[in-house]
Structures are given as structure tokens and as C-alpha cells.
Amino acid sequence: MYEHHTKSMCDTAIKVDNVTKMYKLYDKPSDRLKEALGLSKKKRYKEHYALNGISFDVKKGECVGIIGTNGAGKSTILKIITGVLNPTTGNIIIDGRISALLELGAGFNQEYSGLENIYLNGTMIGFTKEEIDAKLEDILSFADIGDFIYQPVKTYSSGMFVRLAFAVAINIEPEILIVDEALSVGDVFFQAKCYKKFDEFKENGKTILFVSHDLGSIGKYCDRVVLLNKGNKVAEGSPKEMIDLYKKVLVSKEDVTSSANEDHGDINDIEQTEDSIAEPLSDGEDREEVLYEGRMQDRLTLNPQVSNYGNGKADIIDFAIIDEQGNITNSIEKDTKFRIVMKVKCNEDIQDPIFAYTIKDLKGTDINGANTLAERMNVPALKKGDIRTITFTQRMYLHGNEYLLSLGCTGFEENEFVVYNRLYDVCNLSVLSDKTPLGFVDLNSKITIK
């Protein structure tokens, strides 16, 4: 029995009670038709559970994050909460008016002007014309699209469209805000306005349900986090605990699930296999080599459009980012030790190899890096068939943000710079921090006022 209704629940804004969403998967369209017409008594479909008995509460004034890998069920549960989808079984109870930043502009009419769409969208959410009138100036100022507000939406650029859609959704002043990966829209200046508005929501005690792959934002904004994996609730708890657990989900070969009746999962329940976890680093320790079975890079989220080039005298055959606990992960907490490891195979003799990594921001600006030449290391010559594992160990001082990692094996031949192999933008590197970024590097300033 499914219920989706609104009622007063004292201090609870959203109650998700044992929600399941099952899809019927048919091998061919004729099987679906036969079942619909009642022509077959045989079950012709496979059951796929996008959600399996999910339960959690969101208190009023609380910011709760939902994290998990692709296919975990994050967007599905948000669509059920907002009424876009109906669950197969379970109950959803809402206490408060919702504004959802899911598919921005989904309710817009392309033939209407931007102004007409503001009133159309606001009315669909449940606001009166007078309430929308009171918010109109804030919406127009936030969207900042000038006289285009009087033009049909179909004439808008994609950037103008999302600006207006976001401005409408976030300036309506809902009691409950649902956000699904929607804070990074438009240019950097508009993104700054989005995050500032999000901060205002938190300061004003609004209830927020927040889904994001940006673990830095999850750690900064959320009071509590729910971790999903393959349609199951694994655990819920503090952002730090759940982010650490999420990293273990990423490297675990097992299906990590938890009983739907349990309120909290045990972080230690996830098996740490020898081939996926390295030994943790203690202060002052520099481990020169990390041994794994299988490919380390298979445990990372990789760039499918990586630029892989060079003359082929050497190949980077494996690599990893390893956090302070020894997990292979794309996410590193600020002010912790971490390692960048790469394994290089030599295909021809190389006299003076240089091993390097570079970290840059999403705009392509080089932020940091290291190489054996700059560190004045005496690197032995490589013989054909040699395999070397190079480990860079350092502390993370970059601000919380998203970065890109490049790896390289280069050198000089007859005073000419030569690239043997370079993996350009091979994977992302997420730096997790609860501080608001200013610049690139934290100088750890000590401030006194007298």
C-alpha cells in the first residue's frame, strides 16, 4: 500500500517509510504486450529494484545529504518524494511546501515568455499570484537575463534557461528545498550566487534534502548523510563517517547492503580486501612502494576521454590516488597525507627518465604538482622490460574543490624534451573541506584582533 500525503508531523519534515521501487524489465516488446492483454499466464519480465525498502526521516531545519554511486537510487528517491514517480510500495509523508531543483525548467512552456513561465511554475508549486508578485523582483534580479524575460523561452540560450529556472525554484521561499546536483549551473558568478542563496537557506533554518557527487559540498552543508548502494540503504550518520564509508563502497568488490530495518550501518561491516586497501600512513612515514593485486586504477573514477600520448618508449600501466587510511579513492580530505602512485613499464632503454604528476583546476589552470627532476632526484636509467613503481607522498593543502590529475613519464634526449607517455586529465581529484574556498591553497593564517 502506497501513500504520499502532507500532514503535520511536529518536528519531522519528510518521512520515508519502507519505500520500494520495482521496474519490470522485458526481453522484447511483445512480452509486454502479451502480459498487458492477459494473453500469457507465464511471468515474462525480470524484476529490477531501483529502491529496496528505504526508510529515513528528515527533521525540520535539518540539511540531509544522500550519496552513493551511479545507480544507487538517489534520484529515484527524490522523484518519489516530490511526486514525480510513484513507488511500488511504501509511504511518503511530507510536512511543508516543497520546491525541487531536480530537472531545471521541466515545467516550462517553450512558447511562453520567461515572465509567463514564472507565474506558471509558481502556480504549479502551489503559490498564489499575490505571493509570486511579492517574489518577482527577487526572481528577476537573481536570474539577471534583462529584457529576455519578455521573450519566448524557446529563444533562450541554455545558460539563460537554467538561470531563470533556478531563480524561480530557489526564490519561491519553500519550506523544504530538494536539490539534485543543481548548484553548479551557469557561469562561475552565477554559481557563486547559487551557493550564497543555499547558505541563506541553511541560516534561515529551512529543511534541505541534498543529493550530490560533490563530497566537499556534502561535508560542508549537511548535518546528516544517508548512504545508498544499488537501491539499498547502507547506513546513515555524520557526513565524515558516511563519506569514509562511501569510499569503502567504491573500492569494495562485494555488494554492500544493509537491512532496511536498521537505522545505522557499521562502517567496519565492509570487507577491506588485501588487494583494495593499502596500509595507512602515520605521521612522518613515507612509503616508497605500495603493492596491490590487480589494477589499482580500476578502483578509481576515470576520465573516458583521457588524452593518452607519447612516443611509446615507456607506458604508464597503472596508477592510484591513496588516502591517509590506505583507500584507493578520488576523494582526499584537506590537511591529510595522501599518495599518488604510478607504475611504469619501460619498452626501450631510457637513460634519464623523469616521473611527474600535475593537478589543475577545471578551467585548465595548473595548480600544483611534482616531478623527479625538480626534486633533484638521481633516477637510475631504465632498461627494456623494467617496471618501476613511483610514489609521491605529500599533505593536501589545496582548498576543497574539484581538480584533474595528469601523470607523465618524460625525459631529455640530445637536449630535446621527449614525452614517453603522458596521461592527461586521467581522473578527477576531489578535495574535501568544510571551509569556503578562497584562492587555491590554504596558508593556514592565524588571525588576531586587539
Image (cartoon, rainbow, N blue to C red):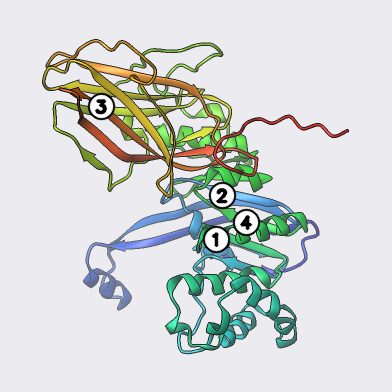
The three-letter code of the residue at mark 2 reads Ile
Relative image position of residue 417 (x, y in whole percent) = 22, 29
Mark 3 packing: few (<14 Cα in 10 Å), some, or many (20+)? many
Asked if disc 1 and disc 2 are in contact, CB closer than 8 Å, the reply is yes
The mark nearer the N terminus, 3 or 2, is 2
Q: CA distance from mark 4 to mark 3?
A: 39 Å
The mark nearer the N terminus, 4 or 2, is 2
Relative image position of residue 430 (x, y in whole percent) = 48, 40
In this view, the residue in front, 267 or 240, is 240
Identify the mark at residue 195; answer none if there is no mark: 4
In this view, the residue in front, 125 or 355, is 355
Please give the name of the residue rendered at 51% of the width and 81% of the height, measured from the top-left corner.
108
Residue at the spot of label 3: 409
The image shows residue 122, relative to residue 22, as above or below, that is below
Q: CA distance from mark 1 to mark 3?
A: 45 Å
Please give the name of the residue rendered at 62% of the width and 40% of the height, measured from the top-left corner.
239
Query: Which corner quadrant of the image does residue 176 belong to?
Result: bottom right
Relative image position of residue 281 (x, y in whole percent) = 50, 16
SS class, disc 2: strand
Residue at the spot of label 1: 78
Q: If the image is split into quadrants, where does the N terminus sit?
A: bottom right
Residue at the spot of label 2: 66
